[in-house]
Amino acid sequence: MTLNPEGFVQISDFGNPKIFSGKARAAISGGQVVGCSGATAKVSSGLSSYVTDDIELYVADAAENCVGIALETVASGARLGIAADGVFILPCFGSVFAGRLVQAGTADAVANVGSQAVPANAQDSSMAGNAFGRSLTAGASGGFAIVHVHS
């Protein structure tokens, strides 16, 4: 697992951070890219049915399920804040070109989205679903880039 040795490093939050909370399904380290999982019918149409634990978080294992970056290190079952929008220094697992869309990988790092074929069906998120943000600087595998995450 490639993590920024400094942990969670945020450059800008545009003055109004976009953070949501959920419950960790496993141990999660600050700075890791996380995804959501869970059972259906956890909430109704009203806000009164919602509790923080309804959103279940785990270390992302696929580009199309990356929803944000963990703000701190927590144990399984603990509540966790997730940054869903902001500008961050992230490790690279492949080429990152400045100004291009990036995807998050299973190594908590980013690389260019690249190009893919037109989706075969409605469940195939393909390239559009892989986009995790847009790079503001270039980077190479093993290095770092500044990325505007907007999951």
Image (spheres, rainbow, N blue to C red):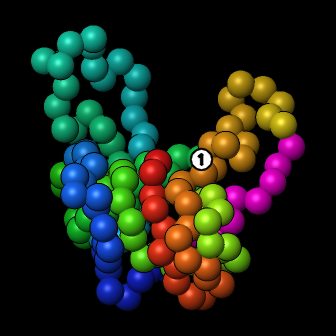
Q: In the rendered image of this protein, does residue 49 appear above or below residue 96? A: above
Observer able to see residue 109: no
Observer able to see residue 21: yes
Q: Nearer the viewer, residue 34 or 149?
A: 149
Q: In screen coordinates, is 104 left or right of 116?
A: left
Q: In screen coordinates, is 27 left or right of 135?
A: left
In this picture, which residue range is highlighted in magenta?
A: 110-117
From this viewpoint, which residue is outermost toward the left?
Answer: 48
Q: In which quarter of the image is residue 137?
A: bottom right
Q: Main secondary structure of the magenta part?
A: loop
Give the residue displayed 70% in from the left and 77% down from the top: 95
Q: Residue 111: x, y in percent?
A: 64, 69
Q: Residue 106: x, y in percent?
A: 57, 65
Q: How crowded is mark 1: few (under 14 residues within 10 Å), some or many (20 or more)?
A: many
Q: Residue 116: x, y in percent?
A: 82, 49
From this viewpoint, which residue is outermost toward the right?
Answer: 117
Q: Could you tell me how many numbered marks the image carries?
A: 1
Give the residue displayed 55% in from the left and 60% down from the top: 134
Q: In the rendered image of this protein, does residue 68 appear above or below residue 111? A: above
Q: Quadrant of residue 49?
A: top left
Q: In the rendered image of this protein, does residue 36 appear above or below residue 103? A: above
Q: Residue 9: x, y in percent?
A: 32, 77
Magenta includes 148? no
Q: Which of 5 and 146 is in front in this view?
A: 146
Give the residue displayed 37% in from the left and 88% down from the top: 5
Q: Which amino acid does label 1 sit on?
A: Glu
Give the residue displayed 60% in from the left and 51% down from the top: 131
Secondary element at image label 1: helix
Provide the residue designation for mark 1.
64
